[in-house]
Image: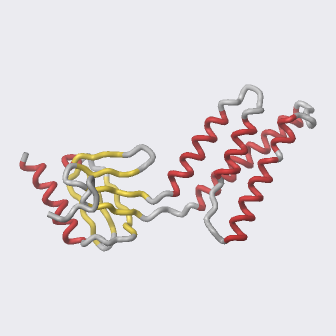
Amino acid sequence: MPKKKSELFQYVLILKKENPENINYISFLLCFISWVLFLYYAYAHNRFSSVLFWASWLIPVAVVWTIRVKRKFSMSVTYKHPLFVTGCVWLLFPGMRWMALLFILFILFDHQSRHPLEIGVSDERIVINTFFRKRYEWNAFSNVVLKDGLLTLDFKNNKMLQREVIHQDVNENEFNRFCREQLDLRFEI
């Protein structure tokens, strides 16, 4: 039996993340559409001197600041600050204050989506570390295989998860033998 790397899991696999630029586009669009809506509301109700109108200009300032920081430091920058500013401006919009809560959720999802997806494998279960952690007992799988850096989780209900593993310091043969033993134990019971 392999030596446990932590008290919970014998193996922890880190999966390759998708390109975060898609998340940035969505965040940018949410901020831009909100800003246009605020300007339209000010135009339609002739409220160019209102707090909502002037506060809405903080949104493009926050977006431009985020883009400049990203270009200046050549680093991955999130849109959490523009999303937060947009959520705060939604608090000023009459009858739509609940939208601020949605923007707080967008910030949480943005944060979670940028973390690498980890899969913990123990002799009891497999845990996928998503926003809402998913736990699967071994009897939910028909096969679990790591081959050439590609992890395949084949569920008994005909679902399949197949993702590329990064930072692989796991011996594939040892991992596959461990998984086969766990699956065989469940089939014997």
Tell me if 24 is positioned left or right of 126 in this view: right
Residue 96 figure quarter = top right
Quarter containing the C terminus: top left
Q: How many marks?
A: 0
Q: Residue furthest top?
A: 95
Residue at the location (63% across, 52% down)?
26
Residue at the location (65% across, 30% down)?
98
In x, y percent, where is residue 176?
20, 65
Quarter containing the N terminus: bottom left
Residue 117 figure quarter = bottom left
| Colouring used for the render | secondary structure
In x, y percent, where is residue 129?
39, 51
Q: Nearer the viewer, residue 11 or 30?
A: 11
In this rendering, is residue 34 above or below 142? above
Residue at the location (26% across, 54% down)?
7
Q: Nearer the viewer, residue 112 or 24?
A: 112
Tell me if 136 is positioned left or right of 72 in this view: left
Tell me if 87 is positioned left or right of 51 in this view: left
